[in-house]
Image (cartoon, grey):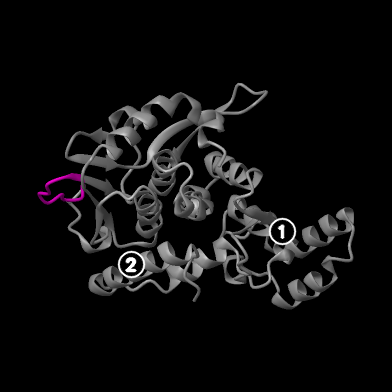
Amino acid sequence: MKSFFHIEPLKSMKDWFENLASHITKAESIRIIVPATLEGILSTVPLEAAFLDTKKSFSRRFVPSKVHQSPDEHRIKVPNFKGLSIVLDVESEHIRVENIEFDDTLVYLQPLEIEVEFKRSEKHRISSLDVVFLASLLASLIAPNGKKTRAIRPMSGLGLWSRSVMDNTIDPMYTLVRNHLQEEGSLRVVPLPEVHHPVLEMIPELSPRMLKRLSERWEHMNYEERCESLSEFALVGIGNEQISTARFEELIWHRVLIGESEIDAASSIFKLKRSWPSDQKSATLLASKYADELLSSNKLPNL
């Protein structure tokens, strides 16, 4: 695996995260506390994979998501535990890295604010590192050569994809993480016609029939023909108020494929979120089931 700290905005955080990973590995027993959401599953599984790779004793506890909590409850409650509790608060607002709370009994992870500078430009943008990516980052430090850790690694950027920031503008951290994983060979990035079973409902107004015809001709086209044909196909959806330009462009040109799956990651995430139960008990049971399946199969649940 190529270190995530090769990503420019993360270089200054290397010592801090190595210190945190070392702190976690010294714990004799660990309990992970995480909301029963899809993002919760994606954040707990990388750490669990790393702990299995290193034969570290741990347990998992799903707690109600914020939709099932009182509006005045801003933090996840942490019951007493003789060991280290790792709280993966995937639903909280972002904080600065120096404000992450951790001691001998608690590590409380929240999304982190991060400043991204653009090459050959004085411009910079405030982005964030979600808890799914933070958990994957820590897992890569805890078990850098772990078999399960490496198998789960391609999903490191899926939390960034799910965050609402991309409903408004391009998220530079998502792009950087996706490109990093592509360059190291952890995943493939392909245009829409190369996905066998995409979900088109994410892109309003596009024609399934036209996509099928385009996909059938795709392998016989040269680069210029592909660019022109795909641009013409997507033209009808440009500017639709139901989807941001950032998401639209990603779903047309940069579909993420993991392993041998014929459905892209964005389609899987869309289907899983659409089918997620609304009641607390069902959500908790399903989260536990999906986490176990993902940990054993290294694949997103297929609906």
Residue 250 against residue 294 in the figure, above or below:
above
Looking at the rendered structure, the secondary structure element under dot 1 is loop
**What is the magenta segment's predominant secondary structure?**
loop
Magenta stretch contains residue 78: yes
Residue annotated with mark 1: 191
Query: Who's the residue at 25% across and 41% down the image?
Result: 108
Give, as a three-letter code, the residue at label 2: Ala
Residue 110 against residue 283 in the figure, above or below:
above
Query: Bounds of the magenta span?
Result: 75-84
Q: Residues within 10 Å of mark 1 (few under 14, many from 20)?
A: some
Residue annotated with mark 2: 287
Q: Residues within 10 Å of mark 2 (few under 14, many from 20)?
A: many
Q: In the image, residue 100 lies at what x, y percent?
A: 29, 34
Query: Who's the residue at 36% across and 66% down the image?
Result: 292
**Which of the two discs, 2 and 1, sits closer to the camera?**
2
Please indicate whether residue 65 sits to the left or right of residue 241 in the image: left
Give, as a three-letter code, the residue at label 1: Pro
